[in-house]
Image: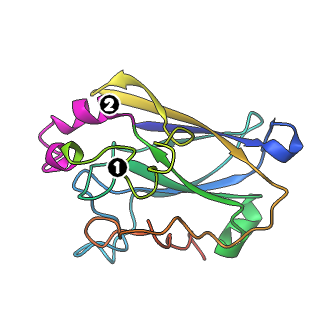
Amino acid sequence: MTLSLTVLDIAGGGAPMTGAAVYVWQCDSLGRYSMYSDGVEGENWLRGVQVADDSGVVTFDSLFPGCYAGRWPHVHFEVYPDEARITDSTNAIATSQVALPQNACESVYALEDYTGSTENLSSLSLTSDNVFGDDGGIHQLGTATGDTSGYTVSLTVPVDTSTEPTGGGAPGGAGGGTGGPGDGQPPAPPGG
């Protein structure tokens, strides 16, 4: 999977947030988060930082995340004003998640590497999810192109830069899968 986020400054008229630093993290195909899930607490994978280009775009090459019990498939992200401030999580100016489209999830979860994801997805909906449920993920639902040989998931991320950073508190709710992050408190970014 390639994840492409376009970060825009809505207080600045929707201009691209050139130079913003974006930290993403996600689970693996089995729903495990490095640094958090049982057995992989000492690992550090499926996490990364990119700096937005002149169009406000960051792009991450990863794998399609699995679906663990109780959460709609997603990728977490935090936006920082610039690369220098990403080492302190209190500088986050936006914390959110990208919801993955159901049709792409269903196709990927039919693959052998995604044990349990089809069953987990079948008991969920965007409106029942504890993060996306307020509006069915309308503002966080990515678009997917491609197929199981490679999806590109895209989302435009409008950020209100006129608000004060609050230190990266993700929406509350049940913990992520098998000891996953956030869905309560996101992990500190690298160096944080």
Name the residue: 78% across, 44% down. Answer: 17
Name the residue: 72% across, 61% down. Answer: 93
Residue that numbered label 1 is attached to: 72
Q: Quadrant of the C terminus?
A: bottom right
Q: Position of residue 101 (x, y in %)?
A: 38, 34
* Mark closer to the observer (1, 2): 1
Q: Secondary structure at mark 1?
A: loop
Extent of the magenta region? 101-120
Amino acid under disc 2 = Ala
Q: Position of residue 120 (x, y in %)?
A: 19, 50
The answer to whether 141 appears left or right of 125 in the picture is right
Name the residue: 52% across, 64% down. Answer: 171
Q: Secondary structure at mark 2?
A: helix
Q: Which mark is residue 13?
A: none
Q: Position of residue 73 (x, y in %)?
A: 35, 47
Q: Which mark is residue 104?
A: 2
Amino acid under disc 1 = Trp
Is residue 188 one of those drawn in magenta?
Answer: no
The answer to whether 110 appears left or right of 50 in the picture is left
**Sequence-wise, which precedes: disc 1 or disc 2?**
1
Q: Is residue 46 above or below residue 157?
A: below
Name the residue: 28% across, 65% down. Answer: 177
- Measure how far apart labels 1 and 2 are at the Cα level: 13 Å
Q: Crowding near pointer 1: few (<14 within 10 Å), some, many (20+)?
A: many
